[in-house]
Amino acid sequence: MPPSATHVLRQRLSDLNDNISHHEIILQELKQQRSAILSELNIVAYPVLTLPPEITAEIFKWCIDTGLRLSPSVAPLLLTRICRDWRALAFSTPALWDTISEIDFGAHPRAHAVVKTWFSHAGTRPLSLGIICPESLDSARLESVIFRHASRLQSLDVMANSEVLCDLGAVQSFPILRNLTLACLDDSDDDEGHIQLFDIQGVPVLRHLSLEGVRPSMIIMPWGQLTKMTLSLLSLWECLMAMRWATSLLEFRRQGPPEQGEESTPEEESPVHHSSLISLSISTSDEDDNILPLLTLPRLQRLELGGRFEVYQTDMDVAIVPFLSRVSSTLRTFTVGMSPTVPIQWFHPLTQLTTLELVHSMGLPFKSDVIRALDRRASPDFLPKLQSFVFADCGSNQVDDELLDALASRCDVTDAAHAKLESFSLFWPTFDYEPGAPFCASSTSECPSPSHAGGTRDAHPHWDARAEQFLLTQASADPSEQNLKRTNNDQLSKPTHALAIISSNFDTACDPACIRSARYLD
């Protein structure tokens, strides 16, 4: 008798139950194996976590970019979000918390609390603080923050409108302050009074002063003890006056064009004789008034000229060539970042020059007289003491036999009157060059900070409002101790600028042909 339909269904159901039971046993075994492997994996320490804390802390210091500190997506706040060990180590490493590059009091009402909390992790280290305070209503908070940390500030950068700067009360003393930067966000008025951040005797170690749109005539300052000064957006008269007051000055830098309407009279533009200045940096534009004819600098060793001139090239030659002649006996390093061209006449007086840097060379035709004159066989008396030559921000097609032959001719020394070329460096950017784009005046100095005459700067792009909340509530978070989060390597490394480089160093036994074997570094 054939099985009934009900019997068949019951048999199939029984078979399915048996299969389910079998696979449940297999699944349970797999889960047990997985648990065992996870237990073994958790026992294995990440190699980076096996480093001694002092080594890890030193690595942390190299993760810091001073311009990007107030963001939870970069160090040091990023380091506190990885694991419990890193969090504790980061907060116990004072070197990570001694600098706040820029914090905008106008945009963030709790910024003063962020400053207090941030610096609380810095231990006893000297502090560096940069503040933006565009509104007069925030001047009280600004003054409170400066007063609170005055005894430990070694660097202070204040960017505010003229009313805020003039209303700041004088702090009795900044005992370790060495660097002071003041930037005015609007047009200052003589009727607003003077700026006095401290007692005249209260900054015994102040050496470096930077003013942007803030006139020296408005500031009460111990000028005689300054050794380095940077002036931006100021008239020629203000610059000359500051140089006269700063009798101990060793380095002077002038950046940006003067403010509109800031013209000097001939009586105000009297010459300046400065016996201690050894480094001068001037940025020149087409309409810029010329400071060089008014300067006598008997000890000048380093000169940097940057900017653009086209219509007034003849006037520039008249001003620059006599100045170079006056400093030719002491000048050792000359950095030129001007365009469109640099006349060879500029270099003829520089018989003692040892280092020449031609920067932003897009404006310097490589087949120019300067390059041809470097060939000692054709011009034996051109820059006879040159030992180091740098060509920066130039086109990648500007390496040819003419250049290499010129450099090779300087590798051999035949008499004491001519120095041997010891090093040559060629840099060009990997990005496309745009004519008229801003550029650094030197391959070895920082680009000047952006200047905005008669208005406020753009909102600080590096401040992340999440950083404020994260820092002030940092005790509430507790990253897992077991699991190290995967992070982008770029977030934990110091930023670099991609450059293609040719660099050669020549020793006494060097064959001139070594120049042609210089490597290209990507």
Image (spheres, helix red, strand yellow):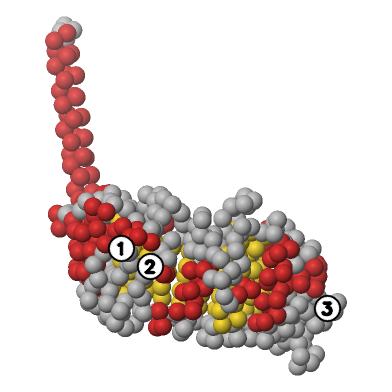
Callout 3 amino acid: Ser
**Residue 437 image offset from top left, x and y in percent:** 59, 52
- Element at badge 1? helix
| Residues marked 1 and 2 touching at CB (< 8 Å) | yes
Determine which residue is flagged by label 1.
Answer: 166
Q: Describe residue 217's horizontal placement relative to residue 374 as left or right.
A: left
Q: Residue at x 19, y 48 (%)?
A: 32
Hey, which quadrant is residue 212 in on the image?
bottom left
Mark 1 to mark 2: distance in Å?
Answer: 9 Å
Q: Nearer the viewer, residue 324 or 377?
A: 324
* Of pointers 2 and 3, the one earlier in the residue sequence: 2
Mark 3 to mark 1: distance in Å?
Answer: 58 Å
Residue 105's place in the image compared with 147, above or below, is above
Q: Nearer the viewer, residue 62 or 456?
A: 456
Residue 492's place in the image compared with 149, above or below, is above
Q: Residue at x 51, y 64 (%)?
A: 235
- Disc number at residue 379? 3
Crowding at dot 3, Cα within 10 Å, few <14 / some 14-19 / many 20+, comes out as few
Callout 2 amino acid: Met
Q: Quadrant of the C terminus?
A: bottom right
Q: Describe residue 283's horizontal placement relative to residue 16 as left or right.
A: right
* Of pointers 1 and 2, the one earlier in the residue sequence: 1
Q: In this view of the protein, can residue 491 be seen by the observer?
A: no
Q: Nearer the viewer, residue 274 or 179?
A: 274
* Of pointers 3 and 1, the one earlier in the residue sequence: 1
**In front of the other: label 3 or label 1?**
1
- Element at badge 3? loop
Determine which residue is flagged by label 2.
Answer: 218
Q: Quadrant of the N terminus?
A: top left
